[in-house]
Amino acid sequence: MESKARNDGKIFRISMIIFIIFLSLIIDAKVNAQINWSVSFNRGSRKDANGEWIPQGFSNKKEVQVSEVRIGQSPGYAQIADFNKDGLADVFATWSDKWWLSFNRGGRRDTNGEWIPRTFSGWNEVQKSKVRIGQPPNYGYIADFNNDGLPDVFATWGDKWHVSFNRRGRKDANGEWIPRTFSGWKEVQGSKVRIGQPPNYGQIADFNNDGMADVFATWGDKWHVSFNRGGRRDANGEWIPRTFRRWKEVQGSKVRIGQPPNYGQIADFNNDGLPDVFATWKEGGSGHWWVSFNRGGQKDANGEWIPKRWQRGLDSGAV
C-alpha cells in the first residue's frame, strides 16, 4: 500500500509538471502571438466636370510589419507621425517604461501605379520614462512643439504639463534611420484643468499658424487655448521652452464636443492655415454637422498672441 501511495504521488507530481509546462506554452504563445500591421493606401481623387471631388478609392491592405507588441493597449500609448522628417508616417509605441519607434522605409510603385511598401524597420528605443502617457486622468499627444518639423511628446500628470523633445538622428551606411534619445521632460505649464476628460474635450494643434503646437480645452460652456510661446536653444543645441500662455477664452458653447453620441475634431476646414472645430449633435431627431471657424488674431506689443473670438458654429443642416 505504501509503495502504491508513493507511485501515485510520483504520477501526480509528474502530471502537474506536464500540465504547468503545457499551460506555460499556451500563455507564451498568446503573449508572443505575432500581429500583422497592414496599410490600405489612398489612391487620391480627381475633380469631375462640375468641380466635385471624385475619390479613387483605397488599395487592398498591404502588410508592412509583423510584431508581438499590442500597440496602444492600456497602459501603453501609441501614435502615428513622421518622426524623421522624410515625409513618411512612422509608428510610436510605449510599453513597460520604454518608448520605441518603428520607421517607415518607403517603397515603390508597380507598373499599375500601385504602392508596394517595404517592411517597416524593427523597434528603436528612443526614451525611458515611468510616465503613463495619456492614461486618465492624464493627457498625452504627439505634435511639433518647437517648429523644427519633428514631432515631440506632450504629457500631463498632476497639475503640470511636460514635453519631451525629439532630437532627430542620422542615417547609417545602409540608409537606415538611427534616432537619438528624446530629451528629458521639460515643464511647460501648470494647470488644474483635466484636458480632454469627459465631459470636457481637449486637443493639440497649431492655432495661430506659427509652426508650434498649442493646447485647446473645454470646460463648462467655454473653449480655451493656451498658446505655445516658443523658446530657445542652449549652447548644446537643446531646446529650452518658455512657459505656455495662460488660458485664452475663444468661444462659448453648450455643445459637448466629442461626447457620445456626438463627434468632435480639430482641423482646418477653410484652408487658411488655422484649425477650426468640427462637431456633430442630434436635435429633434436629426443629426447636424457644425463648424466653428478660427478667426486668427494678432500679436500685442510684447509679442503675445491675442486671439479673436471664434465665429459661432455654421450648421450644415439636418442629415
Image: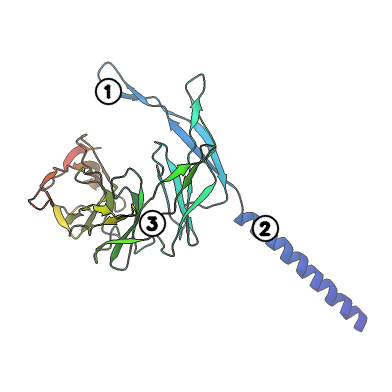
Spot the residue most to the bottom: 2
Secondary element under disc 2, as helix, strand or loop, is helix
Rounded to the nearest angstrom, the CA distance separating label 2 from label 1 is: 54 Å
Q: Residues within 10 Å of mark 2 (few under 14, many from 20)?
A: few
Residue shown at 41% from the left, 62% from the top: 132
Q: Which residue is mark 2?
A: 26
Q: Quadrant of the C terminus?
A: top left
Q: Which residue is mark 1?
A: 52
Secondary element under disc 3, as helix, strand or loop, is loop
Mark 3 touches mark 2? (CB < 8 Å) = no
Q: Is residue 18 left or right of residue 54?
A: right
Residue 48 sits above or below residue 179 on the image: above
Q: Is residue 68 left or right of residue 315?
A: right
Whole-percent x and y of residue 201? Answer: 27, 55
Q: Which is more N-terminal, label 3 or label 1?
A: 1
Residue shown at 26% from the left, 58% from the top: 200
Q: How many marks?
A: 3
